[in-house]
Amino acid sequence: MSEKNNYIQGKTGPWEVVIGLEVHAQITSKAKLFSGASTVFGGDPNTQVSFIDAGFPGMLPLINNFCVEQAIKTGFGLNAQINKISIFDRKNYFYADLPQGYQISQHLYPIVGKGYLEIELEDGTVKRINITRLHLEQDAGKSIHDQHPNKSYIDLNRSGIALMEIVSEPDIRSVEEAQAYIKKLRGLLRYLGTCDGNMEQGSLRADVNVSLRRPGEDYGTRAEIKNVNSVRFMGQAITYEIQRQMEILENGGQIDQETRLFDASKGITRSMRNKENAHDYRYFPDPDLPPLVLSDEEIERIRALLPELPDAKKARFIRDYQLSAYDAGVLSSELETVSYFETALKHLKEANEKSIKQLANWIIGELFAALNRDSLLIEASKVSPQSLAELINFIYEGTISGRLAKDIFTEMWETGEHPDKIINAKGLVQVSDEGEIATVIEKILNENQDKVMEYQSGKDKLFGFFVGQVMKVMQGKGNPTIINKVLLEKLKS
Ligand code: ADP
Ligand code: MG
């Protein structure tokens, strides 16, 4: 655990960025939070709407226990306190896509209390971000403004879908940390199966609160950027917001506490509404819903359903495989990555600290780079976990050199072939035969008598020259360890 500073140098001195995220995660559930209507994405407008979701008078909401279970699971994943009593409140406001005239949410008594999430940063440090709470609430419908020149349409399919709002403390200090947090959270939710994490479809979206302060001073006034729906946009929105606020503050101005929207096409944030006085939601407990009371047995039953969570896996990877915290964090945070890594592990001929470290390096380095380049997810990798493990077996056994392995990997990526096929077809097998290597070395030394003399009279640097010459003759296929060994012997005599 470490605390490093990320101060930004302004014209008038250093600034510290302070960020807190409110993440809305749509619960994976067939039915809505208080009705049996379907939650499937992409249905025709208004085909998945019950009388409850449409706000018809006299309809009574009934809690969907599966959604409650999902929230509790998520609470455990966030290392958080599960509250045995929570209360549903009405959050009153008028909007065309909110037919009830209020949203059912949890205000003072959320189902999940304080917890935390640990994020891995690229410099290898791990940082704990505290979670304030997780509460259950309904989603609103959707207003559609671009289908008709002077009318707006309303689609209520989304109305009443269960959301978890996960609120972080203002512990985040940089774009990198904010992105690491949302990625870690997304991975966790997908692991748990409590949210599909699909940011494009809006199943996961974040309100990003950003403020600046002088190091050591109290928190400054924040602006809240609503509904940011990609990791990249989050980075752009925060970067823009930092510049905007810094300019205002450095010119002696004040930040308005307001809600802003990120305009992805321009890469800027724009003011949406001033929040200062807009807080009057008149929350009160929903008279149609009794307090949500959980028994210890129920909470324990749900705890027992949990899979091994990313942080536990991470700790195990560090303990059993001696991986660095960063590598272990990256390999454990997404279900698909874990599955790739663990499948590959099974195909290592000799799984030990060295070969596993090599496997980790290849996944995080070469494989991730290739996936990125081709915009592929790991589950669509053109190199299967088994093939990658085979490649590492060949390196480990000394059949091929690490340098050639990169070329072989490229070929595996392009053709989907197993490495043995490529190695055999191209004759890339590393030569480790001492006799064969010695013959080449003797020839090189004979042809370069002058350099041998220079080396023997103290010009050590020439060693590299000899290695290079041998490798050249052997077309990169000589085993470097053996070349070094034999060369040393021959040069001594
Ligand atoms: P509200 O309910 O009005 O949105 P909260 O006080 O519950 O406000 O905070 C909402 C989010 O704003 C939380 O994620 C919190 O961490 C973050 N936050 C609070 N103060 C600041 C600040 N000064 N700078 C950045 N983020 C902040
Ligand atoms: Mg808020």
Image: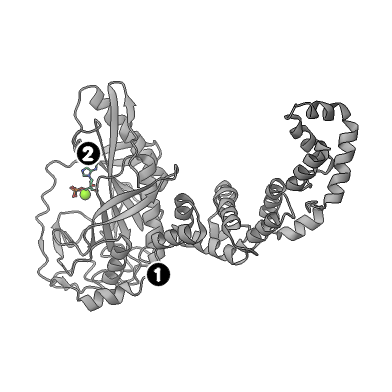
The answer to which quarter of the image holds residue 423 is: bottom right
Residue 437 on image: x %, y %: 84, 46
- Rate crowding at label 1 as few (under 14), some (14 to 19) or many (20 or more) other CA atoms within 10 Å: few
| Amino acid identity at mark 1 | Pro
The answer to which quarter of the image holds residue 282 is: bottom left
Q: Is residue 477 visible?
A: yes
Residue 228 on image: x %, y %: 34, 47
Q: In this view of the protein, which residue sits in the foreground, 200 or 187?
A: 187
| Residue at left offset 38%, top offset 36% | 267
- Residue that carries the numbered disc 2 in the rendered image: 222
Please state the total of marks drawn on the protein image: 2
**Is 368 on the left-hand or right-hand side of 182?**
right
Q: In this view of the protein, which residue sits in the foreground, 389 or 471?
A: 471
Nearer the N terminus, badge 1 or badge 2? 2
Residue 190 on image: x %, y %: 40, 62
Residue 148 on image: x %, y %: 34, 50
| Residue at left offset 32%, top offset 54% | 117
| Residue at left offset 67%, top offset 52% | 409
- Residue that carries the numbered disc 1 in the rendered image: 307
The answer to which quarter of the image holds residue 340 is: bottom right
| Amino acid identity at mark 2 | Arg
Which coloring applies here?
one colour
